[in-house]
Image (cartoon, grey):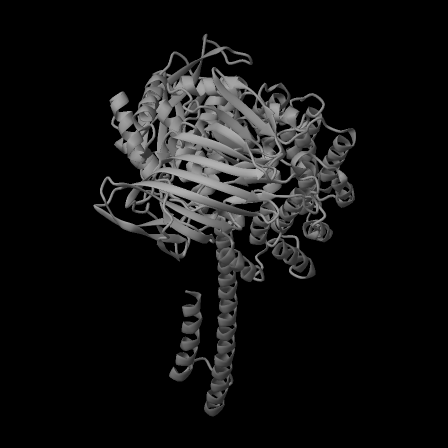
């Protein structure tokens, strides 16, 4: 599965970025009350499931009968249980018989007493007739206020354990079965499911019944049903149909999104050595579906992934399309046994995105994507560290689908490719797939396959990268011995070593650009890359490398294979050469960031020159970020000037974003210039949605006087996926103007506004809170009340975004509403986010209460000291008066004791 917003800029603009400051730092990934979850027992093996359902679009309900065929596994089976939530059970019988069986429900379980005892190996089947108005698993789509053009459709989403809300089943991945699904729908509708279409029957009432059969066993969460009016776009790979289904009128967008699919199938079949295994590959794009889901032979994609012509200029859904296709091998052909091993599905699919990207767009694009994955993982690690293999959660396991199993897991696989070598890596993957075809797998199955295919012992690799948590934090230094012609590189691992986070053992490449000829260094000097693979095994190590000449640059981890943080300080001259000449795109990004930190004259000159000469967009973005962070007149001139020469949209996006660093009132003059450049860009127009959106956000970030008046009229601009309105709301949030709260709250609460516009309005209110410019009072009340009301919005994305935004406001009024979400919602991510926000608010309240208590204690101590001093002074006066003293040169024992007590009390409080 691919969750909405995982990497696409459009999705990030919609959902907002929930950083560590948003959710707060938790001591571990697990939340209070979470427990280890293991797969359920299987008294009998599910062999085949027959589903026969009628979809009633008038009542948003389903009527059906499900027959489950079993083979007994226990020595004696007299009772079976199916997962069934909120289903109205009408009758339960043995298949083909009329006599009803005894059944009862407990929580989300349907328990069935069989007609007799069945021994190990016996076969039997049970039929359940039922109806349901599902709250999850099966979703009906209709036109609604704000989106009157929505078609009537229905779609299912089973991962993780949601299908049991619309049909009774063994709703856990540790059992696989063949399936047959019949769906009766209105006569004008098409219905898609898994496997081969066996027939379409026309019924007397004008409906049609579609019959699909999937003969390759799969877990129940991979069953799919999508119904509605769709246009079919036929394609194929070899002799296998590869068809796309989109809403009528969006055929061109569907082709833009999906036409690379046959090439992807060919690549993945070749790389893995296992040909695409099913009778068809269908991809369908219904409305109101978020993310993407790899149902066996029939992927469902979000409508948000179909780009219009303008969006496709500098945005592509290829990573998502490749991700879901890869699941047909990693997740469908073989499936994780339980959610604790979900990385075997999601990490591989994420890794295969980069395999496709490298093949189609080149190494620079793939390495940039891996770098993004690294940053996303590192941010998640700060919010809660955990191993990749991990089974502690609340209920269904959806909260485990996070940056550890998507991004970090993909990096672990990429590092494994580096460690083993290309040929050995793919040989191991082939054995893993072939050996486990049609099975449920755990991580040990992958480890064993690698060892047998390559002869490499993998115990330590899996222990440190998969079963433990964290990553190495490297501090590296370099020096050159000109007399011995030796480069010295010292490496230290600085992470805290704990039971959870180890000292890492890993290979790494240390590389040098060595001049091709002797002589003084000069611009444009040619050099040869010399790379050495060494093994990091200790907390501190020093390596020596003989080189012909003093190197022009030095890299630790050439190619960016390691999962790490790096502190490597080098002279500006080495970094300047690296920025200009490193063949690795990650090396040039690294140099840009380091030069920005140095900020000397030569470093800034190099950055300014590279800003307009750099050949790859992600490096240009890094250079622009480094210059923007300087917040100087010189940097502003360079950024504005680059807009006249840099044309690549993603590179321009980075330059425009950097202009948001210049902020009023502390930099009034520079911020005004930056705002003017951004306003001019918006007035003249940009081909790219995303450059325009970045300009809007940056304009808000400048906090200049007229920004509010410039931004609000842009709310009239409709755009693909609400990219422009989303940017306006983000800009209003960054602006920190209280009027923005009124504007965004009105959009959020107005159901006549498009559903996605309401979602981005909620995100903007979260951005407004992050500015810390809004004083507690009426403005905060307006925003928080609107966000609480949005928890009842009919659109799931608005609800999710409102939950995250409430976490920004530190307002205790949100807690009862979030507790209601936890008590009533069935979607794992919304429940987990609500729990996290409540914890953050409670921690904030506890900290505030502690501060108030400390202040109260301090006042009490001060008052006690004042009282004590007054008593001491009174006592001194009395004693002096009794002794006839004029002030006295000494104190008696009583006075000394009283003063000592006062000092002691003050000192104790300070400690």
Side (left or right) of 52 relative to 679: left
Percent across and percent down for residue 338 are 35, 41
Q: Is residue 281 visible?
A: yes
Residue 290 in view (yes/no): no
Which of the 4 image quarters holds residue 303?
top right
User: In the image shown, does 761 or 524 lie closer to the viewer?
Assistant: 761
The residue at the point 49 percent across, 79 percent down is 869
108 and 552: which one is in front? Answer: 108
Q: Is residue 626 above or below residue 144?
A: above
Horizontal and vertical percent position of residue 243: 54, 24
Name the residue rendered at 42%, 16% in the picture.
550
Location of the C terminus by quadrant is bottom left
Q: Nearer the viewer, residue 448 or 40?
A: 40
Q: Residue furthest top?
A: 517
In the rendered image, residue 600, in percent from the top left (x then y), is placed at 57, 29
- Say how many tags the image has: 0
Q: Is residue 462 above or below residue 548?
A: below
Q: Is residue 791 above or below residue 212?
A: below
Q: Is residue 406 above or below residue 57?
A: above
Taking the image as shown, residue 778 lies to the left or right of residue 841, namely: right
Is 436 left or right of 907, judged from the image as shown?
left
- Which x, y percent locates residue 480? 39, 21
Q: Residue at x 25, y 42 (%)?
A: 73
**What residue lies at 37% left-to-right and 14% top-to-bottom?**
547
């Amino acid at each position: 599965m691919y969750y909405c917003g995982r990497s696409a800029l459009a999705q990030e603009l919609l959902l907002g970025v929930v950083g560590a400051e948003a959710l707060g730092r938790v001591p571990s990934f697990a939340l209070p009350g979470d427990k280890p979850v293991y797969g359920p027992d299987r008294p009998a093996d599910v062999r085949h499931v027959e589903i026969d359902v009628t979809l009633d679009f008038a009542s948003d309900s389903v009527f059906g009968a499900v027959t489950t065929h079993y083979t007994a596994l226990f020595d004696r089976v007299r009772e079976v249980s199916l997962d069934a939530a909120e289903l109205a059970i009408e009758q339960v019988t043995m298949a083909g018989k009329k006599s009803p069986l005894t059944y009862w429900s407990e929580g989300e379980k349907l328990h069935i007493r069989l007609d007799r005892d069945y021994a190990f190996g016996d076969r039997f089947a049970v039929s359940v007739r039922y109806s349901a108005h599902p709250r999850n698993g099966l979703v009906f789509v209709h036109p609604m206020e704000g989106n009157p053009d929505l078609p009537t459709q229905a779609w299912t989403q089973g991962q993780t354990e949601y299908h049991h809300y619309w049909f009774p089943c063994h709703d856990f991945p540790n059992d696989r079965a063949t399936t047959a699904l019949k769906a009766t729908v209105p006569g004008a509708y098409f219905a898609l499911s898994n496997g081969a279409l066996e027939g379409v029957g026309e019924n007397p009432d004008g409906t049609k019944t579609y019959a699909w059969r999937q003969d390759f066993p799969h877990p129940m969460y991979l069953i799919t049903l999508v119904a509605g009016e769709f246009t079919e776009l036929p394609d194929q790979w070899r002799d296998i149909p590869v068809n796309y289904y989109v809403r009528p009128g969006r055929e061109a967008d569907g082709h833009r999104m999906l036409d690379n699919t046959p090439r992807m199938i060919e690549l993945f079949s070749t790389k893995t050595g296992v040909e695409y295994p099913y009778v068809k590959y269908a991809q369908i794009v219904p409305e109101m579906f978020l993310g993407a889901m790899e149902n066996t032979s029939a992927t469902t994609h979000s409508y948000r992934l179909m780009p219009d012509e303008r969006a496709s200029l500098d945005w592509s859904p290829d990573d998502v399309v490749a991700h879901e296709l890869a699941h047909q091998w990693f997740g469908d052909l073989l499936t994780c046994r339980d959610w604790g091993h979900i990385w075997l599905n999601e990490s591989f699919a994420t890794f295969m995105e980069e395999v496709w990207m490298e093949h189609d767009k080149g190494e620079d694009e793939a390495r940039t994507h891996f770098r993004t994955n690294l940053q996303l993982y590192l941010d998640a690690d700060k919010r809660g560290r955990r191993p990749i293999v991990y089974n502690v959660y609340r209920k269904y396991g959806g909260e485990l689908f996070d940056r550890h199993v998507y991004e970090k897991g993909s990096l672990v696989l990429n590092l494994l490719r580096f460690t083993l070598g290309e040929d050995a890596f793919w040989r191991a993957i082939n054995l893993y797939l072939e050996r486990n075809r049609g099975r449920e797998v755990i991580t040990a199955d992958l480890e064993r396959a690698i060892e047998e295919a390559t002869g490499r012992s993998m115990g330590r690799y899996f222990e440190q990268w998969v079963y433990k948590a964290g990553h190495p934090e490297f501090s590296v230094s370099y020096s050159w011995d000109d007399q011995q012609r030796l480069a010295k590189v010292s490496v230290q691992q600085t992470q805290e070593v704990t039971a959870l986070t180890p000292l890492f053992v890993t290979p790494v490449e240390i590389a040098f650009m060595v001049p091709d000829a002797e002589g003084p260094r000069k611009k444009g000097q040619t050099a040869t890359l010399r790379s050495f693979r060494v093994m990091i095994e200790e907390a501190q190590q020093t390596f020596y490398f003989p080189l012909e000449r003093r190197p022009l640059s030095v890299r630790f981890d050439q190619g960016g294979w390691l999962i790490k943080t790096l502190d490597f300080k080098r002279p500006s001259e080495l970094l300047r050469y690296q920025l200009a000449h490193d063949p690795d795109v990650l090396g040039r990004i690294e140099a840009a960031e380091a030069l920005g930190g140095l900020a000397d004259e030569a470093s800034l000159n190099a950055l300014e020159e590279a800003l307009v000469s750099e050949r790859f967009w992600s490096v240009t973005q890094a250079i622009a970020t480094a210059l923007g962070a300087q917040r100087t007149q010189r940097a502003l001139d360079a950024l504005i000037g680059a807009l006249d020469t840099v044309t690549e949209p993603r590179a321009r996006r980075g330059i425009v974003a950097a202009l948001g660093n210049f902020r009023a009132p502390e930099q009034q003059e520079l911020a005004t210039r930056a705002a003017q450049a951004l306003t001019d860009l918006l007035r003249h127009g940009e081909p790219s949605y995303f450059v325009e959106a970045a300009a809007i956000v940056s304009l808000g970030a400048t906090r200049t006087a007229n920004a509010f008046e410039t931004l609000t009229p842009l709310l009239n601009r409709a755009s693909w996926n609400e990219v422009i309105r989303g940017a306006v709301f983000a800009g209003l949030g960054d602006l920190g103007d209280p009027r923005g709260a009124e504007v965004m709250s009105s959009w959020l609460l107005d159901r006549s506004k498009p559903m996605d516009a309401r979602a981005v309005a909620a995100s903007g209110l979260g951005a407004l809170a992050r500015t810390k410019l809004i004083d507690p009072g009426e403005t905060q009340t307006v925003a928080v009340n609107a966000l609480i009301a949005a928890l009842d919005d009919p659109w799931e994305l608005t609800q999710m975004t409102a939950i995250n935004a409430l976490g920004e406001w530190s307002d205790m009024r949100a807690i009862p509403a979030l507790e209601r979400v936890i008590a009533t919602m069935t979607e794992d991510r919304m429940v987990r986010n609500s729990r996290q926000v409540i914890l953050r608010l409670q921690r904030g309240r506890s900290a505030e209460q502690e501060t108030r208590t400390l202040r109260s204690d301090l006042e009490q101590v001060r008052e006690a000291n004042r009282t004590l001093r007054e008593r001491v002074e009174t006592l001194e006066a009395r004693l002096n008066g009794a002794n006839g003293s004029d002030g006295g040169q000494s104190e008696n024992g009583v006075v000394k004791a009283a003063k000592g007590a006062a000092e002691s009390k003050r000192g104790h409080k300070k400690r």
